[in-house]
Every structure is written in structure tokens, then in C-alpha cells.
Image (cartoon, rainbow, N blue to C red):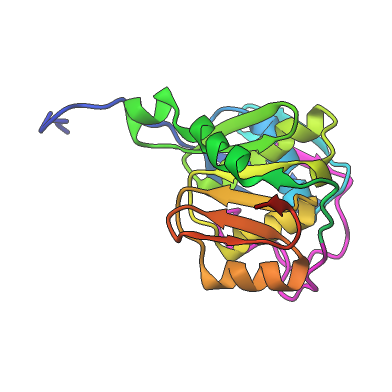
Amino acid sequence: MDIVKIGKRLEIGEEIELKVIAGGRVFRMMCSPNDLEELLIGFSISEGLSENPEVYVEGDVGVIENVKETILSINSSGCIGIYVDENIGRVFPKRKFKIDQVLASLRVIETELYRRTRAYHTAAVINERIYCSYDVGRHNAVDKAIGKAYKNGVDFSESYLVLSGRITKGIALKCVRAGIPLVVSKAAILNSAIEVCEKSGLSAVSLASGIAVNNGAIDL
């Protein structure tokens, strides 16, 4: 096999297959090899597997303990999520975020790593501090950021999520399950995510779509 340069050559992004064991079930996630413990912690919280997960990772195998027994099916984090049928919960912001602050924080996803590779999504949970991570998948990047924030004792109801990818139904539901009241992206928001906002009280800002869905988390 030949790899031939046809233009400006970038660094190649990395992806591995992570085997995950949760509640006696086994599934596999394609992800970047960084922050794997945080990935599984965030995945557990954002997909409703556990509110206080215990996670162990060794090599390319991860174990999630303290999982709920009500799992109906497990899908990749790149899909909608864990539950076949799910009652959408509510989120309640403990503070309002100024729109100028929110838009300015989008700079955190403009990373040097992305410029070198064009391979990764970036996400960050922002409170008084910024908990940022990256992955080849936007869902995984969100989970890693949530996992980092959780390990640092962050109150998600006083935080918001910034990501480089689209705000889809799956991303919106992750925020609701974690208790994050606001999601912000430079990319588009889909109608399915707006429906989640309507039902859950989640607020959202999409720079590409040019709209803010405000359910009380944004100070305009």
C-alpha cells in the first residue's frame, strides 16, 4: 500500500475500538485513545446509565459499574442513546449566562490540534473553569468533557456545554440527562434538538443557524 501526498499533508487522527462492559453487557465504541476513563464516566451520566459511575480502563477494555438495571438497549454513543423509549426529563438552570460571554467562549473549540489534523471534534463544559476534550466523534468529545467536569465536582446546573459539532437530538438529550441547562455550538441545530428544548427546558445557541432557544439560561 502506498500513501501518496496530494496536497498539504496533515497529521493523521487516531481512532481505536474500545470494548466496554456495563451491567453484564458488552458493546464497542470507536473513539480517540485519550481520556478514556472520562469518556466512560461522561457516557454513563449523559446516557442515563448511572448517576455515580465507577469506571475502570485497562488498555482497550473499559468496565462501568453501578449501572441501572433498566437498560433496554445499548447503542454506540454516536447514535441517539441508550433507551428505546424514554421520558424526557427537565433541566433547571441555577444561573443565567450572558449571551456575549457564551459566544466568546466558542474560542475554546478553535484548537491547534484541529488545525493540525482536521480530524477531531472538541467540546467543553464551562463553569468557573473550562473542562475541554477532543475526539473523532462529537458525542464522545461531549462525554469526555462531561467526565472531566464530573471528576472535578462541577455542578452541571451552573454550567453550559460548548461543542464544535451540530446540536442534534442525541446531544440535547445528553445535556438533559446530565442536568446541563445550556448547549452552544458554532454549527447548526436540528429541529429534533429544538423539540427536546421545548419539552425539557434546555436552552441552546447555534451560531450557524442564527438562533438562540432561551428557556431561562441565557441573559440576552
Relative to 115, is 20 above or below? Answer: below
Relative to 184, is 141 above or below? Answer: above
Residue 20 is at least partly visible in this image? no
Magenta stretch bounds:
62-90
Q: Is residue 123 left or right of residue 173?
A: left
Q: Quadrant of the N terminus?
A: top left
Q: Please tell me whether residue 74 belongs to the stretch shown in magenta.
A: yes
Q: Please tell me whether residue 84 belongs to the stretch shown in magenta.
A: yes
Instruction: Residue at 66% x, 28% y: name it.
Output: 130
Residue 109 is at least partly visible in this image? yes
Instruction: Residue at 33% x, 25% y: name it.
Output: 116
Quarter of image, res 199: bottom right
Instruction: Residue at 44% x, 37% y: name it.
Output: 120
Percent across and percent down for residue 52 are 88, 42
Q: Is residue 16 left or right of residue 132?
A: left
Query: Most prominent secondary structure in the magenta stretch?
Result: loop
Percent across and percent down for residue 155 are 84, 39
Percent across and percent down for residue 197 are 68, 67
Percent across and percent down for residue 172 are 65, 59
